[in-house]
Image (cartoon, helix red, strand yellow):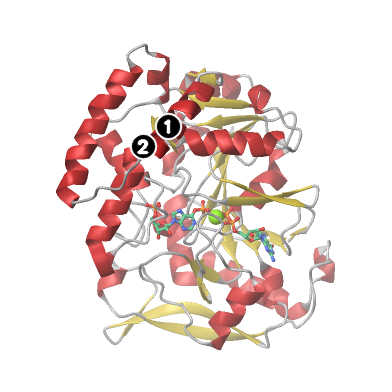
Amino acid sequence: MVDVILGLQWGDEGKGKIVDFFAKDYKVVARFQGGPNAGHTLYVNDKKLVLHQIPSGIFHENTTNLIGNGVVLDAVTLKKEYDKVAAFGIDGRNHLYVAERTHLILPSHRALDKASELSKGNEKIGSTLKGIGPAYMDKTGRNGLRVGDLLDKNFTTQYIKLRMKHQRLLDSFGFNDDISEWEEEFFEAIEFMRSLKIVNGEYFINEKIREGKKVLAEGAQGSMLDVDFGTFPFVTSSNTISAGVCTGLGIAPQKIKEVIGVSKAYCTRVGSGPFPTELHDETGERLRKVGSEFGATTGRPRRCGWIDLVALNFACMVNGVTQIVMTKADVLDAFEELSVCTSYGIDGKQVKTVPYQMSKMPIDPHYEQFAGWQTDITNVRDNTNLPQPMKNYIEFINGYLGVDVSYISNGPERDQIIKA
Ligand code: GDP
Ligand code: IMO
Ligand code: MG
């Protein structure tokens, strides 16, 4: 069977840590969408490491890691990350597989991402500039190059053909940055990729499932960044929700069992777009400071606010979430009072549904207040030792969502997690 771990908010919920925590119980950990826009932070032997392309199961010796067909892959990032992981004594060659149908991000995709963002001015998405949108456009536009193409002797010819197409687009943007250095790096990384285990991902994973091996699908970004169900157009270019597991790995829906949704105890967003519970005041600043809310991929400060149960409820619905892992609960330790958004005021009406286009309508979040626990919980390892105000906070969330918080993460380290 296949279990899924994915983000329920706007990304950076702490998926990397949670996947690393659960990975020991799985034979395969597989990324099914997104690319190097992801930044998943793990702590291994007290050392911090951010993964962008390699699945977060890589530090478990008995776990195989697959980059699935639904991912867009930057070979340069992969090569750098592979070396970083090797510095931890992990030989990726034994543990890492790449699906041949995975689309490649070319240097010119990155240039196109930048050109597109520049052309949008104030309306820019705030993309990570990693070439994600243009690479997925070439996939659905049926132009893209895939990992399997690397093994074709005509790869360079195919590359040049697509590169020329991109140049015409770049010219139309009036964009003329020199990307020859990126291209040099790219071809070096392509050479490296040829030495990896390139497999037919769908047969690979279905064979594992048939053998009764447990598979964990690792989501990137968050449900509110899903290209269909997120706050369009301020979204990423892939299906981040659980449905993406089927198309991004080639597995049937009935194989999916647990859908583990990760949510912070509050909420953050990086990049542009609507965020109803965002705080532009000292409290928002305090959340950013205490939570060290700066992007793991771009270093940008994350926008911070209270937990939004309207959006979370929506995310639980579209994903079929069966349990929730609440992360960064410790960040709220010193807060005197906590707010929880339970409905949106839109056009004078209170609603509990996410509207069609959040970005086009003013949303006035309605909050319920809770007493903070004002206790340091970072050393708690057993739920019986959790402060009562925290139990009240979580119980309210469980009741509202109709899905229970099954684990509480109370610090960035591997062992800072409590079974609820
Ligand atoms: P991801 O993209 O969902 O994997 O999340 P990121 O790695 O981008 O951001 C999460 C950040 O929070 C990282 O710096 C983690 O080390 C950190 N983190 C994860 N869980 C916890 C937690 O329970 N408490 C605290 N204080 N930090 C956490
Ligand atoms: P992880 O996996 C947070 C955001 C960007 C931007 C929008 C589109 O670490 O949670 P893109 O580069 O995908 O075209 O950018 O999506 N974004 C993320 N925000 N966490 C992420 O990944 C993100 N990946 C993309 O900031 O607003
Ligand atoms: Mg992240």
Q: Residue at x 53, y 85 (%)?
A: 368
Identify residue for label 2. Answer: 180
User: So how many labels did they put on this image?
Assistant: 2
Identify residue for label 1. Answer: 184
Q: Is mark 1 within 8 Å of ligand 2?
A: no
User: In the picture shown, does residue 341 fall above or below 315?
Assistant: below
Towards the viewer: 276 or 46: 46
**Mark 2 burial class by Cα count in 10 Å: few <14, some 14-19, many 20+:** few
Specify whether 264 is left or right of 242.
Answer: right
Q: Residue at x 73, y 35 (%)?
A: 60
Q: Residue at x 42, y 42 (%)?
A: 243
Q: Position of residue 28 (x, y in %)?
A: 63, 30
User: Is the C terminus in the top left, top right, bottom left or bottom right quadrant?
Assistant: bottom right
Quarter of the render that holds ligand 1:
bottom right
Q: Position of residue 181 (x, y in %)?
A: 41, 38
Disc 2 marks which amino acid? Ser
Q: Residue at x 32, y 39 (%)?
A: 108
Specify whether 403 is left or right of 363.
Answer: right
Q: Position of residue 177 (x, y in %)?
A: 30, 48
Disc 1 marks which amino acid? Glu
User: In the picture shown, does residue 176 fall above or below 417?
Assistant: above
Specify whether 17 is left or right of 128.
Answer: right
At mark 1, the secondary structure is: helix
- Tell me, yes or no, if residue 89 can be seen here: yes
Towards the viewer: 115 or 334: 115
**Mark 1 burial class by Cα count in 10 Å: few <14, some 14-19, many 20+:** few
- Asked which quadrant contains residue 184, the reply is top left
Towards the viewer: 158 or 40: 158
Q: Position of residue 401 (x, y in %)?
A: 53, 65
C-alpha separation, residue under disc 2 versus residue under disc 1: 6 Å
- Mark 2 in CB contact with mark 1 (< 8 angstroms): yes
User: Is the N terminus in the top left, top right, bottom left or bottom right quadrant?
Assistant: top right
